[in-house]
């Protein structure tokens, strides 16, 4: 569902928070009086059904703590929730004469009371739908914020035979690497093609990077040059096990064929799952790939560079942030602090324009090495905090394609009464020049898209460009 | 997107084991009055116990954590029956190891060298006695030195076993290597990565196979060990490593996982050698951790799944025995340290006596009135 989908970036942060107790948002809580919901302490207990009381808690949690909570017209949340409620009843092939929206006045408490009364009257008549109606209502209220770091999620349902490191799905990644959203500002050009074969059904069927996906379950991935919802079928989620039919074209042989891939669990290469990996490139460049800003990841990157530097003179660092879904802003700031001191890397602003600077940590030793950062459409959140600072503060050059534009602001999780987590930002993120990065993304200094031919041949034109830049 | 959720699930599992593992009450513990050095409980078997340390180097593979080391050095501690009753008792750990362990675990309620003063029962470098004794490999939890399993090791040696405990280098806060250098926890750098546990247990399985090669084929201990009677026991990720080592190395005839979420893939054909899970309530069937349920179906031989009422993650190690010395108050409702050590020693020994010495153990057949804390899962496992 959208709620899940938009939260890629926040996920790593949330998970990190699962272990180290998250710092309570003292300042925020004090100013908002948001006692209706609190950050989780440790792992939540077992999830219980979503009820109208949970929806009420979420409603006041948002109004008390969300970025635009102080100015938000709360009627927009209630209306969105009510629409979803009636749609769900209609989807069940029913309707109710009294399923009409109550009059709202703009008074947040009175409007909630009216909404709750109508909600109870309606759901009492369709008790078999009750649990589901509560879920869609709350999902719609959160979605109505239109914030890519606002998310409501239950505890992930995990396949019983899951092993640490397993993937679930068809076992492939394409150049559109996640189901596209309706409001996705990212542009993808045809064709759709396989970029990575991770395992599972895709590997068993002999798919290779560079294979062009001409149709998915008989539907075209592009219509009039725009992506279609058919692409979502490439990324089925547990417990979906319905086979997905792909028509494929292998350009170098001209072979055209159809496969049916059944979603399932598959083991992935463990080395490839390491968040920080490094190697020496061209004998004098430290290449470090970082797939998330997880706890301590900045130090891991810096240690890797130090190690590669020992006993030789480096001509630069390539930091590969392609596919980096973000994580902790503190890690992004720490890593930036190895390239500059005395600067602000970002601003976090309230809805009324009060901004807090995120300065560099000048206790971090400067590397004093030229930097090239590799970015792509999956570089999101903290990754865009990092990339935008590299650009604005002139710390290095960006190579690849425009970043995701998924950086509304750092999300804070709140535990709801049924042990689900609601998370959203209290402040919105601006770049070092106080520009909006969210939705817009960060453009590369050198635009180098990946082609099916590159993928098929195992070429990396983005890295090649980076090495050229460091050697000229 | 599913991949990301799968990753999420993996991280949650790790976070769970990572979180539940250390959890010593830290600053929030009441003002501490350390009680002076701890004394480990006396071994219960007939034999006096000797101990010695071996440093072994596997030149066939690079170290998995130190990317600049092209060989893997391991510290192995042996415990064994001896006839020598008197002599210098072996140190529990060095002052520096104690300091790194306490600092790493966030314990500041006692002087940093406190654990090095712990009194053990084994005579340092005593001569072993006997031939062709059954061997038990021990593997500790993540970040923990092997010393944290000393109470169990000494007890097993007093009962006639040779025990080989492995400090898996760079997976503990402190391991003193052969040249005196102290290896710290390099693996801690990446312990939130997806697939971390799966990778770590593969490495430990390789450590175990190498140690078995060394102990059974060469050196002065080869005659002491019966190569046909080898088992392995581990706590936390050491228990997960027991499963991994058994899947990979058929020389290990039987194994015990003490409260460890497992990571190794058992082949679809199953694992038919005897295996026992023994854990805390975190590991009841259908609980937070799916791994024991998952593996249970693939264990096709003799198997048990025991859950101890009132046990927590450290009930199977020395950690709680050291709490008084560290000025840490016991957690309310948790098994007292001495009782936890007794239960661990009793059930581990019963398992090994049955499967390595072919002595049938009624304790493993059904609940015992002497040990009412022990519940037999998944059949009779309800919280009492």
Image (cartoon, coloured by chain):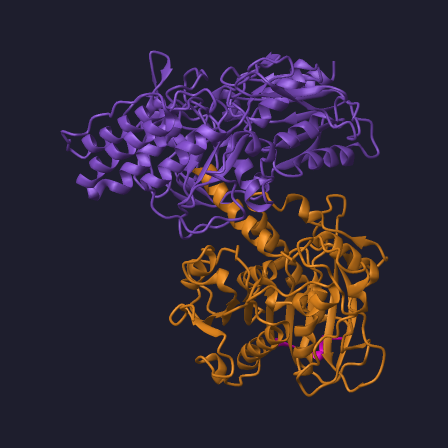
Chain B pictured colour: orange
Between residue A300 and residue A351, name the one nearer to us.
A351
In this view of the protein, can residue A217 be seen by the observer?
A: no
Percent position of residue A265, x then y:
42, 45
Per the image, is B118 magenta?
no
Q: From the viewer's perspective, is B82 left or right of B260?
A: right
- Quarter that holds the C terminus of chain A: top right
> Which residues, given as a range, are shown in magenta?
B221-228
Chain A pictured colour: purple
Between residue B121 and residue B63, name the one nearer to us.
B121
Query: So how many labels did they put on this image?
Result: 0
- Quarter that holds the N terminus of chain A: top left
Q: From the viewer's perspective, is A448 left or right of B169?
A: left
Percent position of residue A104, x then y:
29, 22
Percent position of residue B244, x then y:
56, 59
Per the image, is B226 magenta?
yes
Residue A27: image quadrant is: top right
B46 versus A33 height, above or below: below
A377 versus B337 height, above or below: above
Residue shown at 61% from the left, 57% from the top: B21
Between residue A314 and residue B347, name the one nearer to us.
B347
In this view of the protein, can residue B218 be seen by the observer?
A: yes
B7 versus B113 height, above or below: above
Between residue A421 and residue A212, name the one nearer to us.
A421
Residue B302: image quadrant is: bottom left
Percent position of residue B103, x then y:
75, 53
């Amino acid at each position: 569902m959208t709620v899940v989908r938009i939260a890629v970036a926040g996920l790593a942060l949330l998970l990190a928070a699962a272990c180290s107790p998250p710092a309570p948002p003292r300042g925020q809580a004090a100013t908002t009086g948001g006692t209706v919901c609190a950050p989780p302490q440790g792992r939540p207990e077992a999830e219980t059904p979503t009820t109208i009381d949970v929806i009420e808690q979420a409603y006041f949690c948002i109004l008390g703590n969300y970025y635009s909570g102080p100015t938000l017209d709360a009627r927009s949340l209630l209306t969105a929730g009510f629409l979803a409620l009636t749609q769900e009843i209609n989807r069940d092939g029913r309707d109710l004469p009294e399923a009409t929206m109550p009059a709202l006045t703009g008074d947040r408490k009175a409007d909630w009371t009216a909404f709750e009364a109508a909600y109870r009257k309606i759901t009492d008549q369709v008790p078999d739908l009750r649990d589901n109606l509560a879920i869609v209502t709350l999902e719609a209220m959160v979605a109505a914020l239109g914030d890519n770091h606002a998310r409501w999620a239950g505890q992930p349902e995990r396949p019983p035979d899951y092993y640490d490191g397993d993937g679930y799905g068809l076992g492939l990644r394409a150049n559109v690497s996640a189901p596209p959203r309706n409001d996705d500002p990212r542009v993808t050009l045809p064709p759709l093609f396989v970029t990575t074969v991770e395992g599972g059904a895709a590997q068993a069927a002999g798919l290779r990077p560079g294979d062009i996906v001409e149709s998915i379950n008989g539907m075209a991935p592009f219509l009039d040059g725009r992506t279609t919802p058919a692409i979502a079928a490439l990324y089925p989620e547990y417990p979906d096990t319905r086979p997905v039919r792909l028509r494929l074209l292998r350009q170098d042989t001209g072979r055209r064929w159809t496969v049916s891939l059944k979603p399932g669990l598959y083991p992935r290469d463990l080395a490839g799952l390491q968040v920080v990996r490094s190697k020496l490139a061209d004998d004098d460049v430290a290449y470090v790939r970082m797939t998330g800003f997880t706890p301590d990841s900045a130090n891991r990157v810096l240690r890797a560079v130090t190690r590669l530097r020992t006993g030789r003179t480096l001509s630069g660092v390539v930091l590969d942030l392609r596919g980096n879904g973000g994580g902790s802003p503190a890690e992004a700031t720490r890593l930036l602090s190895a390239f500059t001191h005395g600067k602000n890397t970002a601003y976090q602003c309230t809805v009324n324009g009060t901004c807090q600077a995120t300065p560099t940590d000048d206790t971090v030793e400067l590397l004093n090495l030229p930097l090239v950062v590799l970015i792509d459409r999956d570089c999101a959140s903290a990754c865009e905090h990092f990339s935008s600072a590299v650009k604005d503060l002139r710390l290095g050059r960006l190579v690849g394609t425009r970043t995701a534009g998924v950086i509304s602001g750092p999300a804070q999780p709140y535990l709801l009464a049924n042990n689900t987590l609601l998370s959203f930002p209290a402040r919105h993120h601006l770049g070092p020049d106080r520009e909006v990065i969210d939705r817009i993304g960060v453009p590369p200094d050198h635009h180098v898209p990946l082609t099916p031919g590159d993928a098929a041949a195992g070429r990396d034109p983005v890295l090649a460009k980076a090495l050229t830049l460091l050697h000229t | 997107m599913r991949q990301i959720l799968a990753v999420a699930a993996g991280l949650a599992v790790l976070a769970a084991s990572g979180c539940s593992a250390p959890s010593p009450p830290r600053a929030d513990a009441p003002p501490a009055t350390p009680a002076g050095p701890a004394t480990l409980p006396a071994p219960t078997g007939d034999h006096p116990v000797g101990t010695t340390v071996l440093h072994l180097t596997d030149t066939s593979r690079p170290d998995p954590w130190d990317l600049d080391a092209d060989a893997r050095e391991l510290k192995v501690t042996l415990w064994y029956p001896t006839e020598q009753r008197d002599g210098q008792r072996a140190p529990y750990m060095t002052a520096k190891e104690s300091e790194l362990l306490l600092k790493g675990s966030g314990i500041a309620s006692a002087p940093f060298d406190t654990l090095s003063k712990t009194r053990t029962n084994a005579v340092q470098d005593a001569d072993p006695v006997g031939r062709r004794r059954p061997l038990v490999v021990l593997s500790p939890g993540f970040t923990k030195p092997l010393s944290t399993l000393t109470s169990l090791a000494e007890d097993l040696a007093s009962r006639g076993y040779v025990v080989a405990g492995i400090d898996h280098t760079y997976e503990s806060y402190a391991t003193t290597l052969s040249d005196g250098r102290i290896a710290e926890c390099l693996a801690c750098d990446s312990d939130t990565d997806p697939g971390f546990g799966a990778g770590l247990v593969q490495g430990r399985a390789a450590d175990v196979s190498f140690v078995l090669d060394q102990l059974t084929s060469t050196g002065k201990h080869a005659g002491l060990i019966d190569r046909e009677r080898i088992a392995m026991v581990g706590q936390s990720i050491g228990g997960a490593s027991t499963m991994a080592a058994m899947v990979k190395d058929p020389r290990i005839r039987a194994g015990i996982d003490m409260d460890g979420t497992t990571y190794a893939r058992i082949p679809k054909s199953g694992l038919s050698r005897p295996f026992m899970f023994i854990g805390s309530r975190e590991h009841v069937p259908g609980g937070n951790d799916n791994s024991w349920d998952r593996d249970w179906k693939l264990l096709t031989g003799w198997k048990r799944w025991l859950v101890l009422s009132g046990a927590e993650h450290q009930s199977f190690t020395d950690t709680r025995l050291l709490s008084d010395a560290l000025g840490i108050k016991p957690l309310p409702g948790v098994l007292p340290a001495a009782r936890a050590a007794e239960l661990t020693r009793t059930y581990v020994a019963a398992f090994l006596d049955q499967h390595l010495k072919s002595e049938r153990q009624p304790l493993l057949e059904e609940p015992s009135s002497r040990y009412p804390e022990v519940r037999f899962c998944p059949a009779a496992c309800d919280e009492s």
